[in-house]
Amino acid sequence: MGISKSKYQKFLQKIHVIIYGTNTVAGKLFDLVLLGLIVLSVALVALETVKGFDEKYHTFILISEWTITVFFTIEYAFRILTIKKKKTYIFSFYGIIDLISILPMYLSIFISGASVFAVIRAFRLLRLFKILNHPRFNLQSQQLKEAINSSRGKIMIFMYFMLVSTIIIGSIMYVVEGKENGFTSIPVSIYWAIVTLTTVGYGDLSPASPLGQFIASIVMIMGYGIIAVPTGIVSAEFAAYRSKKAEQNSLKICKSCKNDHNSDESVFCQICGNKL
């Protein structure tokens, strides 16, 4: 009995390395297969909604979805069996997503059309960050996170300015165009202002009067400049953060991978190996 238990524990340890490991060939291969199945599953759910395709390949789609669901179910069970803190995984973000991703197909047995919710499996693509668990990617993601946090206040002020601007523009267009030209209310006019400022331009609502068209032209020109503002704010903070870190620590920035954690005495980049 003891030998059997030992073999079982060794088996679970091997499965744990494959499922949770990112530094082994088997672990990386498993993650790639998993991501491939997730993409395939989402594609099958999307194609199932295409009437002609579904009528022709319905049986193939159904068998494929059930095969993938069974694979995900086994994977979910092994994730629980091979981890010590089972509750931590079960109630974690990924644990909940993993569970929700397999439920739709089982619910479809009792509820017609529930299988379409299998598209939620797309959230499992976030596991890509696990595969990209490399110092270079971690460094860049940390820098981006710091830049976004630093620019949060400026972006909030910008969003407030945009909110006020759309209300003012929408109100003006409601007065200028009126109900006869489709601007039936201020909320509808604000919707037009948002669509125009973001340069989306659905075309479902457009000014007819010369004054309204002139205002619309100004709003369109404003839209091109406004789109670049948030990007510029984050980019400026991103550059400032890297420069500040380099100055504080007397570090060299690699021109190739932009790693700024090289010491002042370094000749080669510690991440990509290129000469500094």
Image: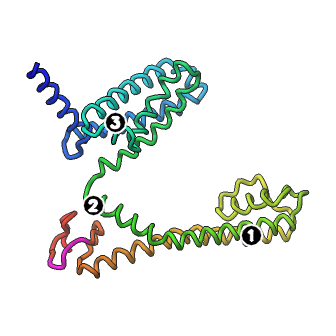
Nearer the observer: mark 1 or 2; the answer is: 2
Q: Can you give x and y, in whole percent of width and height, for residue 40 in the image?
A: 42, 33
Q: In 3D space, how far apart are the residues under numbered discs 2 and 3 (Cα atoms)?
A: 23 Å
Nearest to the observer: residue 120 or residue 229: 120
Q: Report if the CB atoms under discs 1 and 3 are less than 8 Å apart.
A: no
Q: Earlier in the sequence, mark 1 or mark 3?
A: 3
Magenta residue check for 264 = yes
Task: Please rate how many residues cluster around mark 2, counting C-alpha atoms within 10 Å: few if below 14, some from 14 to 19, many from 20.
Answer: some
Q: Can you give x and y, in whole percent of width and height, for residue 132 in the image?
A: 30, 51
Q: Which residue is mark 2?
A: 136
Q: Earlier in the sequence, mark 2 or mark 3?
A: 3
Indicate the amino acid at tag 1: Ser
Q: Is residue 205 left or right of residue 264?
A: right
Q: Is residue 28 left or right of residue 212?
A: left
Q: Report if the CB atoms under discs 2 and 3 are less than 8 Å apart.
A: no
Nearest to the observer: residue 107 or residue 175: 107
Residue at x 28%, y 81% (from the top left corner): 248
In the rendered image, which quarter contains the N terminus? top left
Q: Which residue is mark 1?
A: 217
Residue 6 figure quarter: top left
Residue at x 39%, y 77% (from the top left corner): 240
Residue 37 figure quarter: top left
Residue at x 87%, y 58% (from the top left corner): 181
Range covered by the magenta-colored residues? 261-265
Q: Earlier in the sequence, mark 1 or mark 2?
A: 2
Q: Of the numbered discs in the image, which one, if any, rests on residue 34?
A: 3
Magenta residue check for 223 = no
Element carrying mark 3: helix
Element carrying mark 1: helix
Indicate the amino acid at tag 2: Arg
Task: Please rate how many residues cluster around mark 1, counting C-alpha atoms within 10 Å: few if below 14, some from 14 to 19, many from 20.
Answer: few
In the rendered image, which quarter contains the C terminus? bottom left
